[in-house]
Amino acid sequence: MMHRRSSRGAPDVPRASDALPLRGLPRAQIAVVVEVTRAGRVDRHELTVEAGVPIRVVLRKIGQAPEGSAVLVDDTPVPLDRTIDGPTRLTVVPTFSGG
């Protein structure tokens, strides 16, 4: 039985999978506005993310704990695993505070 890369025969040529790039084509960049409402004040964050990023990742990028936040899009609550697929405005309401 021969090993996959025998010392005899053809020279050591990289397999096709060894030559593939590590990443595919770059994803589209999307503008996201995040407004965090807290105690009657609104902190506004503007950032650009890759298409397909979950909302929880966006919250982490601005330093907000996803697990302690309610997120709304157009006054409708959305799950944290929902992905960003186009320009979006998120309203974030922290659901607990430290103490």
Image: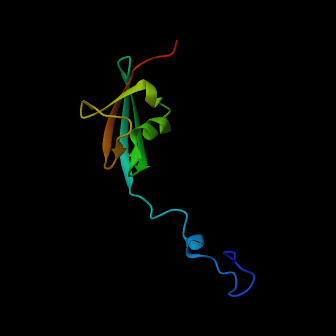
Measured as percent of width and height from the top left, residue 58 is found at 43, 40
> Outermost residue toward the front?
1
- The answer to whether residue 44 is above or below residue 11 is above
Measured as percent of width and height from the top left, residue 52 is found at 38, 50
Q: Residue at x 40, y 43 (%)?
A: 54
- The answer to whether residue 67 is above or below residue 19 is above
Q: Residue at x 40, y 26 (%)?
A: 69
96 horizontally vs 17: left or right = left
> Outermost residue toward the right?
7
Nearer to us in this view, 22 or 90? 22
Q: Residue at x 35, y 41 (%)?
A: 82
Q: Residue at x 45, y 27 (%)?
A: 67
Measured as percent of width and height from the top left, residue 10 is found at 68, 87
- The answer to whether residue 36 is above or below residue 81 is above
Nearer to us in this view, 40 or 99? 99
- The answer to whether residue 50 is above or below residue 79 is below
Nearer to us in this view, 35 or 9? 9
The image shows a total of numbered marks equal to 0
Q: How is the image coloured?
A: rainbow
41 horizontally vs 77: left or right = right
> Outermost residue toward the top?
99
55 horizontally vs 5: left or right = left
64 horizontally vs 28: left or right = right
Measured as percent of width and height from the top left, residue 31 is found at 36, 48
Q: Quadrant of the N terminus?
A: bottom right
Nearer to us in this view, 81 or 17? 17
